[in-house]
Image (cartoon, rainbow, N blue to C red):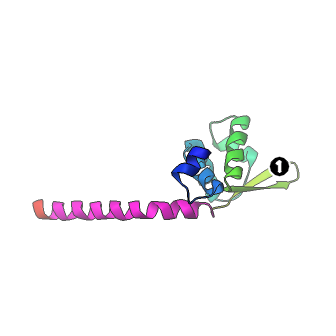
């Protein structure tokens, strides 16, 4: 964690955990499923090609990063997306979006001029 706080000195560790959590494709897939609505852990296991312990491990990382919340409903744990930590990620990506848009505009202009 020291390395992350050195690289991103103005971010708190919860937000840094969001960056780390998003690095894994399985965790992104879990977030995509939760974007559609709340799901019990068992339903996530059914939708993913992972074991129950594997899904639980990823859910723990997402909980610790503040990206999901859990509530107990009977014998089930029901997970929901908590998108607030994504706001800082979105903010960090904004300059890159402007760069990509600018380059796409340049490509469009080049194509118009040469075809």
Is residue 28 visible in the rendered image? The answer is no
Quadrant of the rendered structure where residue 66 is?
bottom right
Secondary structure beneath disc 1? strand
- State whether residue 45 is above or below residue 81: above
Predominant secondary structure, magenta span: helix
Disc 1 packing (10 Å; few <14; some 14–19; many ≥20): few
Of 60 and 88, nearer the camera is 88
Residue displayed at 26% across by 65% down: 105
Residue 88 image position (x, y, % from top left): 55, 62
Tell which residue pokes out farthest to the left in this image.
114
Q: Which residue corresponds to mark 1?
A: 76
Residue displayed at 53% across by 54% down: 8
Q: Does the magenta stretch include residue 85?
A: yes
Q: Is residue 64 magenta?
A: no
Quadrant of the rendered structure where residue 86 is?
bottom right
Which quarter of the rendering shows the N terminus? Answer: top right
Residue displayed at 11% across by 60% down: 114
Report whether 85 appears left or right of 41: left
Of 51 and 7, nearer the camera is 7
Is residue 78 visible in the rendered image? The answer is yes
Residue displayed at 67% across by 61% down: 82
Which quarter of the rendering shows the C terminus? Answer: bottom left
Q: How many marks?
A: 1
Report whether 5 appears left or right of 41: left
Point out the stretch of residues depicted in magenta: 84-112
Residue 90 image position (x, y, % from top left): 51, 62
Residue 67 image position (x, y, % from top left): 66, 56
């Amino acid at each position: 964690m020291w390395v992350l706080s050195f690289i991103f000195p103005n971010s708190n560790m919860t937000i840094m955990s969001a960056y780390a959590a998003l690095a894994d494709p399985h965790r992104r897939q879990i977030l995509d499923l939760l974007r559609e609505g709340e799901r019990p852990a068992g339903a996530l296991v059914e939708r993913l090609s992972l074991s129950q312990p594997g899904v639980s491990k990823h859910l723990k990382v997402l909980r610790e990063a503040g990206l999901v919340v859990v509530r107990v409903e009977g014998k089930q744990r029901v997970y929901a997306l908590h998108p607030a930590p994504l706001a800082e990620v979105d903010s960090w990506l904004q300059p890159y979006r402007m760069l990509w848009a600018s380059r796409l505009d340049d490509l469009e202009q080049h194509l118009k001029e040469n075809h």
